[in-house]
Amino acid sequence: MHLDNLPGTGVGDYQKYTRRKTVFILFLCGLTAALFFLGIVIGAMTLSVQDVISSLVSPAESNASLIVWSIRLPRVIAALVAGAGLAAAGVVMQSVLRNPLSSPYTLGISHAAGFGAAFAITALGAGTLSHNIADAVTVRNPYIITICAFAGSMLATAALLLVARYRNSRPEVIILLGVALAALFTAGTTFLQYFSSADQVAAIVFWTFGDVGRATWGDLAIIALVVIPSIAYFVYSRWDYNAIDAGDDAAQGLGVNVERSRTVGMFLGSLITAVVVSFMGIIGFIGLLGPHMVRAIVGSDHRYLLPAACLMGSILLLAADQVARVIIAPATLPVGVLTAFLGAPLFIWLVLGRQRL
């Protein structure tokens, strides 16, 4: 059990310690619900609270209902699920690699998934340009894209696991490997663009702009079928991750199969990344921001860290999407731009001040 920042050793002190974490998680639940509802209200066309409630309770053939059910609701659900999934993937990757800088984006896994998706769009003809009800360009036939994105993410994951296992590398080496993988797969994507048609290049470029608004109800079903069971497995394995944080030898002494936990954790984290990337594009730094923003309060105990990080990931993506919708209204800024603006300074701070973690 993690007792970091424990104020005392008495039962009363421990109850206060756990109560603070529980209250904080409940606060995050309320904030998530508020941002979820606010995400349905605001946009290029602001809806009244009464219109939103009426549309949710009794959908009708009205403009408000059409906006709520066809545009706003899928968008906020996508942000909710994707944010939670990416944050959970970040928590697990940081644990199994014992590296506080790990996340799907900083390890190059998102870039690898992006390369796989670009390959599907160009070489396999999986990408076409179309317009949806919001008059936004989308890339369709995402199922082949998902498979190729997953294959790309698994290539990066295999490289990371091999280095971590056989080289016993320091955390800095893993991050440098992630930077190298990101550069490699970005170069591969650029190579594919060079030999693509104008329409294919446009499809790849637009698709790489992370945007939760392109997910349809069918897409959300697939994303949820991957993200929710994966998070459930992470929560089920929370004690294993706590043990791994103490070191491989200590975890094995407690009966934890470290290699299996590490491989399955990285596999599911990569699967979450691949599905999110294939349907929404590259959304960076949520897997880094979410865990670190809550760790100072809930500590490193995965019983509390996992749910708190998932909620914070959803909050960050919901908030970023709402800002993206209004900052240059009526146009919508890709949410991936805002998450990069938020995440890059934190990443720099973590690198420079890593001795304080």
Image (cartoon, rainbow, N blue to C red):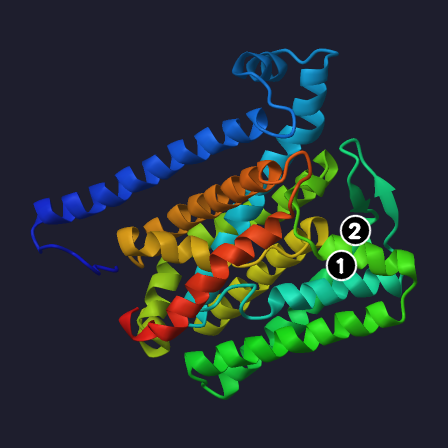
Image mark for residue 143 = 2
* Front one among 156 and 70: 70
Residue at the spot of label 1: 147
For the residue marked with disc 2, what is the amino acid?
Answer: Tyr
* Number of residues whose C-alpha sits closer than 10 Å to that of mark 1, classed few (under 14), some (14–19) or many (20 or more): some
Give x and y (percent) for residue 322: 55, 37
Query: Quick check: 252 left or right of 150?
Result: left
Image mark for residue 74 = none
* Gap in angstroms between the C-alphas marked 2 and 1: 6 Å
* Number of residues whose C-alpha sits closer than 10 Å to that of mark 2, classed few (under 14), some (14–19) or many (20 or more): some
Give the mark count: 2
User: Can the viewer see residue 256?
Assistant: no
Q: Residue at x 67, y 55 (%)?
A: 277
Where is the N terminus found, in terms of image quarters? bottom left
Q: Residue at x 61, y 30 (%)?
A: 43
For the residue marked with disc 1, what is the amino acid?
Answer: Ile
Residue 178 vertical placement versus 196 (above, below)? below
* Front one among 272 and 187: 187
* Front one among 266 and 206: 206
Q: Are marks 2 and 1 in contact (CB under 8 Å)?
A: yes
Q: Residue at x 39, y 63 (%)?
A: 241
Q: Secondary structure at mark 1?
A: helix
The single residue placed furthest to the bottom in the displayed view is: 167
Where is the C terminus found, in terms of image quarters? bottom left
Residue 153 vertical placement versus 25 (above, below)? below
Q: Secondary structure at mark 2?
A: helix
Give x and y (percent) for residue 30: 39, 31
